Image (cartoon, rainbow, N blue to C red):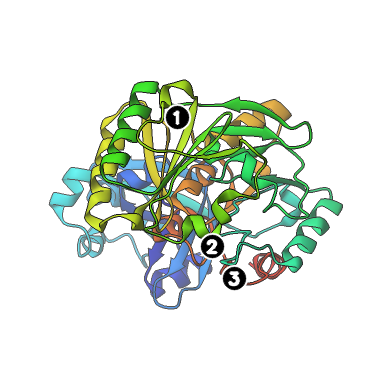
Amino acid sequence: MQREFLVENKWFKKIRHGQKVYEIRLDYPSRQDLKVGNLIRIKNQDSGDFEVAQIEQIQKFDSFKKLFAAIDNLKLGFENNDPNNYLEIEKYYSKEQQKEHKAVAYKIKLVKFNLDEIDNFVFDMDGTLLNEKNDIFKENIAAIEKLQQMGKKVIIATGRPYYTLQTTIGNIKPDFPMIASNGAMIYDNQNHELIHYDSMPSKDAQQMFDELMDLNYEFLIYTTNGMFGHPTGATKFFPERDNYSFLAPGVYTEIDASFDINKHHVCKFLILTDSAESSLIKKIEELSASLSGIHGLYSRKTMYDVMENTATKGKGLMFLASKYNLDLNRTIAFGDGENDISMFDVVKYSVSMDNGFEITKRSAVYPGYDNNSPWIGKLLLFLESK
């Protein structure tokens, strides 16, 4: 859900100085899941400066005229209670738009970031903890260790399967099982045990496999007992990873059209969108949308992920919260891809990387830095200034 609210400079100043305690909008679907207690980011569209606010009340109306009649206009940022004040808002939203979407008023209270109110830190890997060289900066490792010394708990939530994580996780020691394959697998790294998985219906997996083979895509299949790949030479993805020769024998296998997918519990397809003509990915997107047992999203700009319909990082985080009694209102998640938004939706605090998707940035409470720098310590200092 969208947490970013762009406002003009004059309204931003009023919000910052307590002269405007309501943010009013059309009730668009992208914000309809917002609830009392959620944090939102009020962003000055002119300067980029922002404040974070907590929603205290949500009121919905058929029109802005009715909204202005019900709420003290001084709290809306106006100088008086002139009955025609609503016309100022109708410069932005037509009566037709109001009829379609209605109006909503969010009563807000500005809040400050407080590290003492956060117990759990959830990190995505690719595009977040990992830089473009597939490394974790030593400064970020040190920052994570410092957080753990302070009593904070660390969780890894990634689109990768658990069997490739061992070589990338470096010196990080998560405090809880890892959320892998976008939530389709939960792996206990200490006991080396897959404690939960969501596999897609066999018929849906078969249809997706057949379509990918017909279109000659490069892709990976993550299953509960190993990973299967279809390299075509169209990209450098497989050579850059030494065709996964670093994995234990039997973990990775190359496949062709004869592969019997029905013998496996399929948790995820990773599709390299730049391995075929750009127009063809539409067919994959449409197929994933048409099959009730699966869903698809972008984890990176050239990677389209397909999972079982309910498998998300957010659901994986809720599984851990239930199993280990974690308070998601005292949890912060960091990510860059569409696959991270489901985490942002279930935790109180969230940060989108500067290199992330625009939709991911709009869905996070706080903006972050680029993943190609040692950002964790710098970000925490910045947030504490907010």
Name the residue nearer the viewer: 273 or 198. 273
Q: Residue at x 58, y 46 (%)?
A: 158
Q: Which residue is mark 3?
A: 372
Counting other residues with Cα less than 10 Å from the Cα at mark 1, is it few (<14), some (14-19), or many (20 or more)? some
Q: Nearer the viewer, mark 3 or mark 1?
A: 3
Q: Position of residue 119 (x, y in %)?
A: 74, 46
Are circles 3 and 1 on residues that touch, CB within 8 Å? no
Q: Which residue is mark 2?
A: 353
Residue tagged 1: 310
Sequence-wise, which precedes: disc 2 or disc 3? 2
Where residue 100 appears, x then y in whole percent? 18, 44
What amino acid type should be assigned to the residue bearing mark 3?
Asn
Q: CA distance from mark 2 to mark 3?
A: 10 Å
The disc label shown at residue 139, or none: none
Q: How many marks?
A: 3
- Image quadrant in which you'd find residue 109: bottom right
Instruction: Locate residue 296, reporting x and y percent.
Output: 37, 41
Q: CA distance from mark 1 to mark 2?
A: 25 Å
* In this rendering, the label closer to the viewer, 2 or 3: 3
Label 2: few (<14), some or many (≥20) within 10 Å? many
Q: Amino acid at mark 2?
A: Met
Q: Is residue 140 above or below residue 298?
A: below
Q: Are marks 2 and 3 in contact (CB under 8 Å)?
A: no
